[in-house]
Amino acid sequence: MERELPTCPVETTLLMISDKWKALILRDLLNGTMRFGELRRSVGNVSQKVLTSNLRQMERDGLVHRKVYAEVPPRVEYSLTETGKSLRPVINAMRDWGVSYQAIHGNQEHPAS
């Protein structure tokens, strides 16, 4: 059963990558296939439960491929699908914007909201 997507394309994109961890997972998998432990270390301070949940959602959405090897102990590798790889320009644009913002605002105190 296919999920109903928003009519707005920007909203659809945000639905796929709006979670902080999903964007970081994409960032790291753009460099190639990774095992779960490698991905957890590279993404940062994410719990195993949250990383697993995000990877499952991304697999369901067709962004990530999960390959299980019949070994003891089992080995699982994650990679981006072609759809996931197509997000490279979005992730690169986010990186470029962040670099520019940090250059301008990096050492300033943020006012309280």
Image: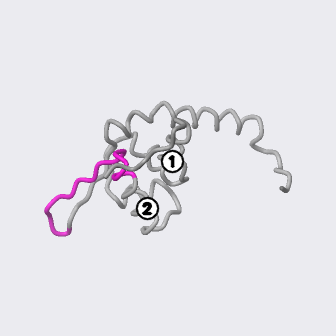
Is 104 placed left or right of 61 in the picture?
right
Residue 8, image x, y percentages: 54, 37
Q: Which residue is mark 2?
A: 51
Q: Which mark is residue 15?
A: 1
Comparing 50 with 73, the one in front is 50
- For badge 1, the amino acid type reads Leu
Region of the chain picked out in magenta, as a range? 58-73
Q: CA distance from mark 1 to mark 2?
A: 17 Å
Residue 55 in picture, x, y percent from top left: 38, 56
Q: Could you tell me the amino acid type at mark 2?
A: Leu
**Of residues 109 and 59, which is closer to you in this image?**
59
User: Badges 1 and 2: C-beta atoms under 8 Å apart?
Assistant: no
Residue 105 location (% of width, % of height): 77, 40
* The stretch drawn in magenta includes residue 63: yes
Relative vertical location of residue 107 with respect to residue 41 in this rendering, above or below:
above
Q: Where is residue 73, by image quadrant?
A: bottom left
Give the numbered dot on residue 99: none
Q: Measuring 48% from the left and 51% from the top, which residue is drawn there?
A: 22
113 left or right, relative to 74: right
Q: Position of residue 37 (x, y in %)?
A: 36, 61
Q: What is the total number of numbered labels drawn onto the structure image?
A: 2
- Queried whether the magenta region covers residue 30, the answer comes back as no
- The residue drawn where x is 55% and y is 42% is 11
> Mark 1: which secondary structure?
helix
Residue under the point 34% across and 48% down: 64
SS under mark 2: helix
